[in-house]
Amino acid sequence: MRAARLTAPGTLELVDVPVPTAGPGEVLLGVGAVGACHSDLHILDAPGGFPTPITLGHEIAGRVEALGPGVTGWTPGEAAAVYGIIGCGHCRACLRGLENQCRTVPVGGIGISRDGGLADYVVVPASHLLKIGDLEMTQAAPLTDAGLTPYHAIELSRPSLRPGTCCVVIGIGGLGHMAIRILAATTAVTVVAVDSNEEALALASRMGAQHTVRAGQDAVDQIRRIVGPPPDGADVVLDFVGVDSTLTLARSVVSAGGQLMLVGLGGGGLTLQTGAGPVPVPLETTARIPFWGTRAELQEVVALAQQGLVKAEVHAFPLTDVVEVYDKLRRGEIHGRAVLVP
Ligand SMILES: [Zn+2]
Ligand SMILES: [Zn+2]
């Protein structure tokens, strides 16, 4: 079968490999669609390198092809989405259903620490499959990360997302555009979308953002005209970029008692400074670094999609285009989510 593999640090190649076999408790899935995520670029660019070779792709939907020994509850041909995080299953966090906080396995996942879905077939633990009914594969795949990750961040900040409050969303890419859709579907907040790209801002408007702001020198002033002067401001800021400039913007517009949700893994730093300073974080503000989401939350995101409330902006490509698609992603030419179809 074909598989897009990280064969050496920085090198992604479409190669031929044997079809894997499902072991005890596992399922062989025929991949229907797999999302191209910015995190894959972080894996490709990891300074210390990543263990190679490994098949990338952690945003997967497909059909059950074969069951490993001991698997029940699934029949061949059934459609499923894959919960991508692999926790240890027995630590304090995993036992509470918070595999995204596993205390034993740092960032384990399908397509991260074991072979992923950028291939014709992938083997996954049966416990990581969710039934998706007749959802389109190209819509289901992005739900597992581009949908789940913002949904988790929104769930964590939901007590602050009261009707009539304001949420600033920074970075309208694969995750950011879904965040706006989820906010529009599940809250009555005013959404302010921030991005450096006009096409991304147009997408934000289509997803339900009431205001769009071009990132740059006067972005803080523009947002302040919407959210009011300090100590008022945005009750929640979702930063899907996470570089120094976006973190500075985030803390410059958050309200006293607000929530900073730092989702993007851009490597930026946020100084938590008490009292006076050039850009102090307002009093009573909470900063949090949400990661991916839980299995239960994925089920909820799938339910939102099944009811037609959440729909990703998808651009589908054949698996043979995989290297080019990641180049496009790197150049910022994908608005919404690129999905590869084997
Ligand atoms: Zn991802
Ligand atoms: Zn664990």
Image (cartoon, helix red, strand yellow):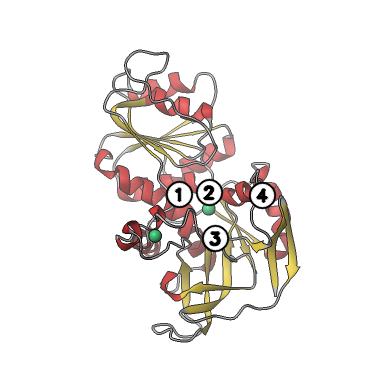
Quadrant of the rendered structure where residue 96 is?
A: bottom left
Vertically, is 189 above or below 43?
A: above
Q: Residue at x 32, y 25 (%)?
A: 233
In the rendered structure, are the residues bearing label 3 and label 4 in contact, judged by CB atoms less than 8 Å apart? no
In the rendered structure, are the residues bearing label 2 and label 1 in contact, judged by CB atoms less than 8 Å apart? yes
**What is the C-alpha distance between the residues marked 3 and 4?**
18 Å
Q: Secondary structure at mark 3?
A: loop
**What is the C-alpha distance between the residues marked 2 and 3?**
14 Å
Tag nearer the camera, 2 or 4 = 4
Residue 203, position as x, y percentages in the image: 52, 43
**What is the C-alpha distance between the residues marked 2 and 1?**
7 Å
Mark found first going from the N terminus, 1 or 4: 4
Which amino acid type is shown beneath numbered disc 1? Met
* The N terminus - image quarter: bottom right
Q: Is residue 214 visible?
A: no
Question: What mark, if any, has residue 174 been given in the picture?
Answer: 2
Residue 286, position as x, y percentages in the image: 31, 33
Q: Which residue is mark 1?
A: 178
Quadrant of the rendered structure where residue 263 is?
A: top left
Quadrant of the rendered structure where residue 20 is?
A: bottom right
In-image side of 157 versus 69 (left or right): left
Which amino acid type is shown beneath numbered disc 2? Gly
